[in-house]
Each structure stands twice: as structure tokens, then as C-alpha cells.
Image (tube, rainbow, N blue to C red):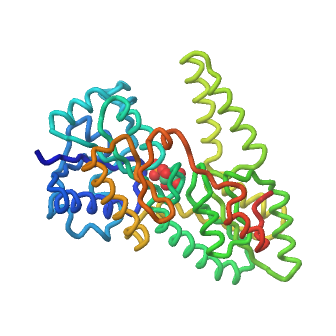
Amino acid sequence: MPKTIGILTAGGDSPGLNPAIRAIGKTAARAHDMQVVGFLDGFRGVMENRTVRLDGDMLSGILTRGGTILGTSRDKPHRMEVGGQVLDMTGAMIDNCRQLGIDALVCLGGGGTQKNAFRLSKAGMQIVTLPKTIDNDVARTERTFGFDTALSIATEAIDRLHSTAHSHHRIMVVEIMGHNTGWLALGAGIAGGADVVLIPEIPHDIGKVAESLLARKSSGSRFSIVAVSEGSLSAEGAATRAELRKKRAAAESPKEKSERTQALRAFEASRSDSTARLSRELQDLTGLESRVTILGHVQRGGTPSPVDRLLATRLGAEAVQAVADDDFGIMIASQRGEAVRVPLEEVAGKRRSVPLDHPWIQTARQLGMNLGD
Ligand code: F6P
């Protein structure tokens, strides 16, 4: 019997998802005579049995399209809102897949999706995952698809901010996506020639940032570009967050855990205008006029770059090969240019942050960029 593969895309969308879906569909049909069914809107579609047959017509013309033709959501199988209640739907989802004759589920997503897929795998589903996110922070893979496209968009934004910063002799603070990791801000900061780059991995001291901007002014540069990851924190902020996380991890009852989760959420919410505040503080400390640009979801939109298309296509084709080999509970990673199978347990619940001795950090320092420390 030819196998049937189910595919879903979950978490924030990312350029490269459609090329990956296309690669899975075409490889399954052409190299293995398998069928492919798409679930709509992430794990919710599996729970609600909402499917679409991914045949030639559906796959045609999607290589260059951003987003995901399947739709996405951040729903979790083990904590899904159903009829006003939050329920564990893992068993129901596995039953649905059985009834649909799905032999393997390929889940395309970032860190959260890897965790959810691992849970399903432990519950008995035959799972293969692919790493996608513009944040580039999935463990055990050197690249996630979506990152390259977002890097180009963020770099172009910095390029464009240069000319207006120069004309008005201003500080331009640009907020770049990356709630927990700074790959995108650091990469775009270096590629775009930012003067300051602030990332979550390096808690910053605003006094030192201001000093570096004043030093630029003294040396005759009358404008500066400050690239900030949305998750970057001051040293005090980082200490508060670490403490709140520690307390939540040490909670002894579900009630305590929920209270401490609320406290952590309140802290994150209080940071919602942190880039605007940073800009105001820099303006006050330096006496230089400052403006803020928040790139937001523009970074995730539009056509995937050739690099992302190539990566997503290679990983997608290898995912089908893994299904053909009956190799499950794995993610297809990119390591040294190869599509490599890694156990999901080495990926789930882990995050790939920028190592403090990463060559990009060294390069930034060699160039005299200020990293806030
Ligand atoms: O994980 C990808 C990402 O784009 C992050 O960089 C960002 O913090 C987050 O998603 C935004 O999520 P949403 O689209 O749900 O607001």
C-alpha cells in the first residue's frame, strides 16, 4: 500500500513554508508514489479534521509565495481551547489521523512546534519535522528556513534608514524581530552597517550605548543606527526576568505555577514599548534627536529568497525520504550544507541562542560596533 503523509504548518508563518510543502508533495508523488494531505491551520486542523488534498493543482505556482497555503496557528495539542475549555486533544488527534489513513505527520515549525510534535511522537504518532522560523533559533540546525528572507528585509531597512539618519543627523533605532534570540538583529546589523546592535543574549547598559553614540559624534559622525532585537533587555531587566523564570520553575503547585506565569506575562507586557523607551532615553542621554522604526511582520512577509527556497526544498525532499525509510521521531536539520536527521528529543524544549563567542559577535566587535556591554 502506498503511504499517505499528512503535513501541517504551525507557529508564526515564515517565508519558505510553501516551497517546503511543494517539495514534500512533489517528492512524495514522483519519487515514492505516496499521497499527501494538508491539515489546515496547524494542529487545530488535525483536531478538527480540516484537510485538503495536496495534489498537482494545489502545489503549482506556490514556490514563490510567502506565508503558507495551509494556514497556521499557535494551538498546542495538549492544551487546546475547545468550546470554552482548555483540553488535551492529543488522543483525539491521533485517532483522526488513523481514520484518515495518515501514516506519518510532517510538522513544519519553530521551537514550539518541535515541542508539540515531540509530544505527539511520544504519544505514538509517526512524526518528522522541519525547522522553520525567521528567528533561526531551532536547536541542532544551523539554519531555519525563513531566516535568509527576513535577513534581507531587515538589512534593506537598515540601508534605507542610513540615508534619512544621515540627512537629519539623527539616531535611528530599528526594532528587529527575535523575542529570545538575536540572530536576525545581529546578522542584519552587521550586513547593514549598524553602529549599535542590542540582542537578548547580551544584556545592555544604556549608559555605555549612549557613550558610544557620543564618541561617534565627537569623531565627526553625526548620525547613528541602533539595531535592537525585540527581546533585548537591560542588565536589570534580564536579572528580573531570570528571577521570575526561576521562581516559576520552582513552583510547587499548579496554582503557584499559574500565578508565577501571570507575573512573567505581566513583566513581558510591561516591555511592549521598550524600544520606544530606549530611543527616548538615548535622546535624553546624548542630546541627539532619535526616531524609532519597528519592522514588525513586514520581516515575515512576501516571497521567499532563493536561499530559503533551496533550503526548504532540500529539507522537504529529505523528510519524505525519511518517511519512506520508516525513520520517525526526527527533525530534518541543516548541518554543514547537508540535510541531516536528528532525534526530536535533542530539539524539543531547547533553543539555539547566539553563542557569545560566535564569529558574528567577534566580527561586530572587531569592527568597533557597540553591543551594549
Ligand atoms: O517566532 C517568529 C516570530 O516572528 C518572532 O520573531 C516574533 O517575536 C513572533 O514570531 C511574533 O509572533 P506573532 O506573529 O504571533 O505576533
- Which residue is drawn at the image coordinates 37% and 48% (left, top)? 129
Measured as percent of width and height from the top left, residue 222 is found at 79, 79
- Which residue is drawn at the image coordinates 62% and 41% (left, top)? 268
Q: Residue furthest left?
A: 1
Measured as percent of width and height from the top left, residue 243 is found at 72, 33
User: Which quadrant is the C terminus positioned in?
Assistant: bottom right
Is any part of residue 302 visible from this angle?
Answer: no
User: Which quadrant is the N terminus positioned in?
Assistant: top left
Is any part of residue 44 visible from this angle?
Answer: yes
- Which residue is drawn at the image coordinates 68% and 78% (left, top)? 165
Q: Is residue 38 left or right of residue 158?
A: left
Kindly indicate the quadrant of the structure image that contains residue 279.
Answer: bottom right
Q: Is residue 250 left or right of residue 171?
A: left
Measured as percent of width and height from the top left, residue 79 is found at 40, 29
Q: Is residue 3 left or right of residue 94?
A: left
- Which residue is drawn at the image coordinates 64% and 64% (left, top)? 186
Q: Is residue 292 left or right of residue 335?
A: right
Compared to residue 176, the image places residue 7 above or below, namely above
Measured as percent of width and height from the top left, residue 215 is found at 87, 72
Compared to residue 64, the image places residue 71 above or below, namely above
Number of numbered markers: 0
Q: Residue furthest front?
A: 325
Kindly indicate the quadrant of the structure image that contains residue 69.
Answer: bottom left
